[in-house]
Structure formats: structure tokens, C-alpha cells
Image (cartoon, coloured by chain):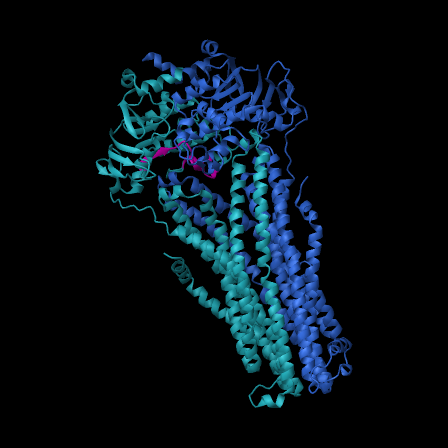
Chain colours: A cyan, B blue
Amino acid sequence: MNSSTRLFSLLKKQKGSIILLFVLANLFVVAQLAQPFLLGKALDAARNNNQSLYIALLAVALILIVIGVISGYFFEALASNMSQRMVKDLREEIYQKIIHMSIEDFDKRHLGDMLQLEIRDMENMFTASFSIFKTLLQGLFSIVVTIIMMLLVNWILALMVMLLTPLSILVARFVSSFNHKHFKKQAALQAEINDLTLESINHMDVINAFNYEEVMADRFNKTNEKLQKEGIIAQFSASWVNPSTRLVNNTIYALVGITGIIMMAYDTALAGVYAVMSLGALSSFLSYTTQYGKPFNEVSNVVAEFEVGRSSFKRINDFLNLKDDIDEGTKEIKEINSIRFEHVYFSYDKSRLLIEDFSITISKGEKIAIVGPTGAGKTTLINLLMRFYDVDKGAIYINDIDIREIKKSSLRASMGMVLQDTWIFNGTIKDNVSYFAKDKDINKVIEACKKARSDDFIVRLPYGYDTRVNAYEGLSQGERQMIAISRMMMKDPSLMILDEATSNIDTRNEKLINDAFDMMMENKTSLVIAHRLSTIKKADKIIMIDKGQIKEIGSHVSLMKQKSYYYNLYMSQFK
Amino acid sequence: MKSVGQSYRKYWLSIILGAFSKLVGALFDLLIPLFMKAVIDLNQYGDPNLIPQSISKNIATFIRSFGVWIKDNVALSDALVGGTIIICMGVIGFIITMIGQYIAADTAVKVSNDIRGNLYTHILSLSKKEREEIGEHKLLTTLNSDTYQIQQGMLLFVRLVTRAPFIIFGALVFTFILDYRIGIAFSVIVPLILLIVFLVLGQSKKKYILIQNNLDEISSYTSDTLLGERVIKASNKINESNEEFSKYTSSYYGKSKRVNYINAFINPLTFAVTSLVIIIILFVLKNNLFNSDSNEQILLISTLIACIAYLAQIFFTTVQLTTVLIDLTKASIARRRINEVFIVNSSLRSGEAAISEVYEYILEFDHLSFSYGDKQDTPTLKDISFKLKKGESLGIIGGTGSGKSTIVSLLERYYEYKDGDIYLKGKSLHDYPLSIVRNQMSVVLQKSSLFKGSIKDNLCLGKDIAEEDIIKALKDAEAYEFIKAYDDFLLHEVKENGSNFSGGQRQRLCIARALLNNKEILILDDATSALDLLTESKIKANLKKRNLTEIIISQRVSSLMSCDKIMVLSKGEVVSFANHETLLKESKIYQEIYNSQIKEKDDE
């Protein structure tokens, strides 16, 4: 979907509000702009000594004020509420996309950028939308109504004002086109600073340990200086808009006033062309020229906000245009009985083959360990099995069904996965542990935590199971892993995948956790990736892989007898 | 102590200069309606001296002083000369205003950059404890968005702080001079408008803070989702997550709506007040208008024309002031938040001592106890004592949460300690400047921290290091092989957090970095956990050759069994302290650990 189509569909949802906004804006604007007209007429009535007309005109003005206040209030409230509504919908849509996008697209993106879509870009969208529906709408109506009012008073002066005002627009246009370039540069530098600060705060321990503060401060200051230079230019160029439109408006004010004064002197000649000029008419006109300039001023302000909003919307649109992770599979699986990799080929980056002709069969109840040097492709196998990525060639079968025919949700739900980089979200320990469970009974949570050995440290936390934790603070790496394992203990899946899941847990606890796993996974399949060979010795099959290919398969005992790859690896821990 | 105010004060002259230029520019804007009235009067009366109002008469005389250019049509000439003068005033006002605008942009950006720079340096100086207390999120928002708010606030402040009141006040004064009755009416409405604005803003300001909290929630929930993408995808929680997220957006929406309903009062009410005042004036002046002769009537009407123009200026400026106030409110919140960071000082004690190379022990812990926060009853470290000679190696082993990493945190002076002491080369850590302490040791932390940049940037960390040294370190860290494979070798890109490397590669890069830092003491905190055993043992052998004083923290016995001394930690206490052989014989916990990891081999 291109941006305009998406924008149109967004607006379509707000059809009712937009129509109402048009009506309210009209009422508000007419009530406001009728005032100078009525006053001018009243002054002329005074010149002609017509008291009753004078009173009547003032009364009409009074009624319009009341209408103006009411319509104005609802106009403003509706304009901002509608914009908020739109932002709310967009926010939710983006969130949907975040959880439905494919892992491949996800891995290509910066987390920070995606986060900013929800925060800064949304704020920009709100400002832009509010500007358009409030300021722009009101401004455009004001311009039209003023023109009509002016035509009612004196068409010659009205034409003059109409001919001169494009000047105001031209100036605003010129100035903002100049701005755009500088704001873009400023934004790029701002992003650079943001990255730098994020990095500094993430890596502060290392910065401190290596006395790297000065170098970082230096880098920061350099970028900050660049930002300063660009910022001054950007802010200054933006600040031309108001004074220059004011200059144009002052000039128009002077020209209209002087022309009006001169016209009054040629009263009789102008009567012939229905353009009689009076003091009252001059008063209306001078009011209109001051007011007429205002919407142009405001509309020109909108330009900047609109620009910012547009680039945000483009980012949002690009993101929403990402394809959802397609789930072409239709079959459901309940339990995993067998897994078969058949001549699987895969690479992330087409120039470097990562998995090459990989075949293996795993049957129910087996405990499989995958070992091999870093970068051998162990984690990739998991990515393929869970269909975060699809194989390039060959196929993977579960229960003899090609996994591409199985619903992803069904496939993934049947597996339990614990990764080295554990995920702890903002919530209580209990929330985190019971994440997968339908029944969030605290006793079950405690039971799972006891099995995963995490109960010991959880009870020592300030609020026990109700202690709030988040992605950054509160727990050590090992503790995080134990929470993630507790979570899996509670899920009780039919296939368990452990990818370096206990790497930061001490070995005594690790052993106890593994015993608990073994008990839970009896008659079920598990797949373990670990560097600590002690964890996998009991595996039914150990698959030794290197460079995406299987080097050896066998039990610990049989592989030790072969005195080859595995043997060397195993013996190295005693050197 | 640094503060936001300090940066403001640094630029006081620019602030005043900028505001002053804007003030002069505003004066020209104010004079235009007055001149227009004078031209009308001059046109209606024909001669400046006939105008019965002194201010208008004086201006008319001034206009006439430029001469009569069209002799047979004096009225036309006056109108044209007057018009030219008004346009010229507009241009002069514009030029002076633009000078003010430049100064405003220059000052605002410089002030905010000054604050950002100070803030960054300040944050660098804080200890980990303070950073954790303030929170990462807040540190980032103050650095990035709050400083921007300050900039926008300052921009508006310089541009409008004098201009807005001056226009309002000046317009009132001129109105008084023209007709005191209208002046009185106008002076009533200015406070009225301001009252409306402040009442409304006062209400909405409180709500703004609540909205901000909601936005933080949305941000943290999104961030959680992003971090847990894989786990969420592997769960059936997608709908639940959506619902949960909707809860946050709905709450944000609801609160924003309430603020909108309050804010929407401002413009319609101010419109009502300004329109009403004119109608009231016309009612009051009705008798004067209808009972006066034509000449007085003309003067009254031309006065009204000028006053209406002033009212327009008062109105626009007050409305402008309200939007400015919203931004200034945001800036003041930002200022408060930034100052909250500035006010926090590092809790780390430090002295001025220099390193002396005459000492018995390179490192000594003397009855050290430590706890994070205020939980004194369950300290993280309890009464730790040990001594280490130069060139010796110390292994620290223990379960999760036993306090192993805390020892590193204290050595690196991330946290302040109170009970007991740590001596480095004979003097307490408190006696040295922080940089000297840290300069004595190289550390590889549990979490591999890599910076965005190139491999070389990450290894050298700003220092100038010869390529052969880099290669040597890479070889010792067993990282040379995989780096050699890159076409761009050392200039190969490192993405944010080193995400383009595997865990093991990141650890090896961090080890190489620590070796290049080249200090006498090397601390490895679970630094090889993602490495396979073969690679680890090679690295260990390479390190041996370097003759460093090593502190190796690990959960693997194999990683540290060759150390001269091994400390077994449990729940923050030293349970055994000896070498591998003795521990195997004497320490029950060590035996257990050893058995869980290694012993079984003998059974098979």
C-alpha cells in the first residue's frame, strides 16, 4: 500500500468526525469573521444616524459570538480527539505488525528504530494530524469566508487583497523548502547522538573499566558540535516564516489602508461600479487584512509540522507494508513423534552457505545434543526447525509432515525453547514464569520454580514472587536463565529445545535442573545445545557438527571410543 | 554542581540581546496602526493642525514633513507618503526581528548542546549504583528528548518573552492614549484572557505528567515485545499481547481526551472575550457616536479602527503566548528532570594517591562486606579476605548469586563499599583516583559489550596500537582465525551490541581487547562461557605466557583449576580457599561441583 492509500483508508475510518469537523469549523469561522463586517456596518449606521440598525447589527454580532464559542469548543476538542484516535489505531496496527512480521524482517531491523515508530513517530503523527484538522482546516475556511465577507463590503479592495496574498503563500513556501533540507540533516545528527548515548549507557561498565570516558566524551562532543552547527541553521531558517509573513501582511495592511483612503476621496466615481468606500467599510477591511494574514501565518506553521509528520508517516507506512509472516500451513500437530531433516541447505547470506546437505532423523523420546564449535550452525538448525527461517533446499518433517504444511502457531506451540539470551519482560516474577500457562495458579508457579532451582533466590527477593523485574534490571544473567527455564517447566512442551540455556548457571544447580528436565522430558524429545559437555553426556545421540555438516553421531561412549572430533573436544577440558 | 541554570547563565548576554532585538522589532509592529490612523485623519481633516488629537496630529505632521509630492492633489500625496512610511517601518521591523531570530536560534541550540554535553560528562562520572537508581530509561530521555525540549523552550523564550508582553502592554498604552475608555475596557480583558489560559493550563499540566507516564508504559511494553519477539512468536500469546497493548493505548487515549476537553476551552473563550469587549464599547460609546458632530465622529471612528487593530494584536499575541506556555511548561518539566540527574553525585570516594611499585601484595581484600541497596541483613559479600602476590592467579568459583561478579564490580569501582577495605599495591582503593585503579587492571565482563564501529575501534578503544600488537592479541584470544576471513579484516564492521557476531566471537573479541589494554592484572568474569572447551583451553595456555596477575571467575572447574589459589564462594561467604588439589580433598562443595562437571568421566 502506498502512503496516500493508507492515509485515505485511515481518514475513511474517521469519516463521521471529519464531516462534523467541517461543520463546526464553518460555524466557528463564520461567527468569528462576521464580526468585523457587522461592526463596519454599525459604524456606517452611526455615520448615517440610524440608531435602530446600529442596535440590530450589534445584537446579531452578540448571537454569533455565542454560536462561535459553542462550535469553537467542540471543534477544538474533536480535532484533537480524532487525531488521538487515529494515533491509537496506528499504534495498535504497528504493534500487530511487530508481532506478526517475519523473523527475517525482524532481524534486519534495529530494535530502537521499531521502538521509535511507536513513540516519536506517533507523536509526530499526532501533531501533524492535529495541525491539519485544526489549524489547516480552520485556516482554509477562514481564508474563504474572509474573501466572501470582503467581497460583500467592497469588491475592488477585496480583489486587491486576494491578488496580494499569494505573496504570503509564496514566501512561506520558499522558506519551508529551504528548511526541509536542514531539518533532515538535523534529524540525522540527532539520531547519531541518540545512538551514541544509548551505546554509552549500555556499555558503561566497559567504558569505566577501560578509562574510555574521555574518548567517548570526545566523540560525543564532536557529534554534539556538528549537531549544534546544523541545529542553528535549521532553527534559524525555520524562524523566517513568521516574521516574513508578518512583513508581507503589514505591507498588505498598508496598501489596503492607503487604497481605501484614496478610494474614499473618489466616492462618487466609485458609486457607478458599486464600490462605494466608507469609514465603516475601511474599518472592516483593515480588520480583515489583519485577520486574513493570520491563517496564512498558521498554515505556514503547519507546513513544518506536516513535513515532520509526513516523513514519520512514510516510515510507518514502510513498516506496515512489511509482509506478515505468512502461515501457509494448514495442518495442526498435537504431539511431536518424529523429526527428520532431509538434505537441508540453508544460508542467511546467499554468498556463504551455512548448512549443507544436513540430514538426520530424531524419534520420539530421544535426547539429542548438538555440539560443535562456535559458528558451526547449531542455532541455525533451531531457527529452521521453528520456522523462523525456511530452508533453501531440502525439507524438514515432523511426524512425516513437511513443516511448511503445518501451521506455524501449532508448530511453535508444541515446542518449548530456552535461549541463551533470555527474555524477561516488565512484570512480576510470577507473570514471567506463568507466561505460557493458561492456569496461572501460584502453587504451580512455585512448583515449576522449585524444579528449576529458581525458588531459592526468588524467595530472597524483596517481594518474593511478586517482585517486579524487567529486561534490564533486577536479576543476574544466571537468574534470568533460571526464570526462563521455570517458564518452560510450567509449559511442559512435547519437544524441548535448549540453546545454551544454562550457560550462566552454576554447575551444581545446572545438574539439578537437568535432572528435573530429564524427568519432565521422559518419553518426550529434547534437543540440547551446550558447550558444557557434562550437560549432554547422557544424551541418546550426540551430533557433532562443524561448518553446517555432521561430523559424527553417536552416544558419549561410542564417540569417545572413536577418538576423533568429540574425543578431542571432550578431553580439552582437562588440559 | 552542574545545572541547567548554569548553562542558561552562560548565555545570558545572548538571551538579553536576542530578546531586545525582538522588542525593537515589536515596536515597529505596534506603530503601524497608529500611523494608519494618522493617515486616515490627515485625509479626513486635510491639514495636520486641524486634527483635534495630539498624538495623531504629531504623526500627521511627521508624515507631512516629507513634503507634498503631488501639488494638485495633496490628499493623494499624503496617502502615498504615509503608505510608504508604513511599509518602510514594516521592513525595518522585519530586519531587526530577524537579527533577534538568529540570536534566538543560536542561543537556544547552544544552550541545549551545552546542557547535553554537561549531562553526558556528568553521567559518565556517576557510579553504577546511581545510574541504576536513576534508571537507564530516564538517563536516555534526559539526554535526548529533554535537552531538545529545553532547546525549543529557550527558542520560544528568547523570541517571545519580551515581544509578547511588550506587544500586549504597548498596544494597551497606545489604546489609552487614543481613548481612555477603550483603554480601560482593553485592560480588563488582558487579565481575563490570561486567567482563562492559566486556569486551563494549570488543569492540563497535571494531567500531562500522567500522560507521560502512560507513554512510558507504551514504550516499555513495546520494548519488551521487541526483545521477546522469538519467544512471543513461539507462544500462543499473540492475541493476548495485542489486548494488553490496547489496554495501554486506550488508557493513553482516555487521558489525552480529558486533557483535550480542558484545553479546547482556551481559544473559544478568548474569542468570546475579545469580541464581546468591542460590542460593549460600541454600546457604551453609542451616545458619543450619535450626538457628536461629523468631525468628532470621524475621529472616534478612526480611533476605533486603530484600537481594533490593537485588539487584534493583543488577541493574537495572547493566544500565541498560550501555545508558548505549553512548550515552556514542557521545557520546565524537562529542566526539572535534567536537574534531578545533575543533583545526583557519584558515591565513589577517591583520593589523589599515585601507584608505588614497592609493595608486598598486589591485591588484598581485608574483611570486606558489601550489600547492594540497604539490605544489610543479607549481604552480597560477607567478610571476604585474601591476599594476592604479583603474578599469582586466583580462581573464584561459586553458584549463581554467590557474589562472584560483585567482587569484580568492587575492584572496578562500579560500586562504593563501606565495610572492610581493598588494597591495591599496598594502598586502599579509596586513596587512588578512579582512573588509576582502573588503569591497573584489564577486565572481561560477563556481558560482552561491543561498540558500533569497526573491529579495530573496539579493540583499541581510542588508543593508537600497532597492527602487529593487535594481531598478537587476537591470536592469543583465538580470534585471529575468524577475523582473518573478513576481506576488510580489522576494519570489518561491528554492529550495535556486536549483533553480527556470535556469543563466542564476541567473548573472544572482548578478551583480545582486554589483552591490548595491557595491564598487570587481568580479570576474567565468566569470560569464556560461550566458548567451546577446546578454544578455551587454548586461550588459557596463551594467557599463561603473558605472566599476568589473573583473577578468573567461572562456574567451570576446568576454567580455573590451574589457578594458584581457588576461592569457593557460597551466598557471599568464602567457604574454602586453597589450590585445586587441596580443595578436592578438603572442600565438600568443591568436590560436589567437580563431580557434577568432570568426575563422571572416570566412571566410564
The magenta stretch spans residue A426 = yes
Q: Is residue B81 left or right of residue A301?
A: right
Q: Is residue A236 left or right of residue B472?
A: right
Above or below: residue B312 compared with residue B349 = below
Who's the residue at 45% across and 11% down the image?
A: B584
- Rendered-image quadrant of the C terminus of chain A: top left
State the residue lying farthest toward the left.
A400
Residue B255 seen in render: no
Residue B115 at what x, y percent from top left? 63, 45
The magenta stretch spans residue B578 = no
The residue segment tinted magenta is A413-434
User: Which quarter of the figure has residue B29?
Assistant: bottom right
Residue A74 at what x, y percent from top left? 52, 65
Is residue B594 or residue A16 the one in the foreground? B594
Residue B581 seen in render: yes
Who's the residue at 60% across and 79% down the image?
A: A38
Q: Is residue A288 left or right of residue A306?
A: right
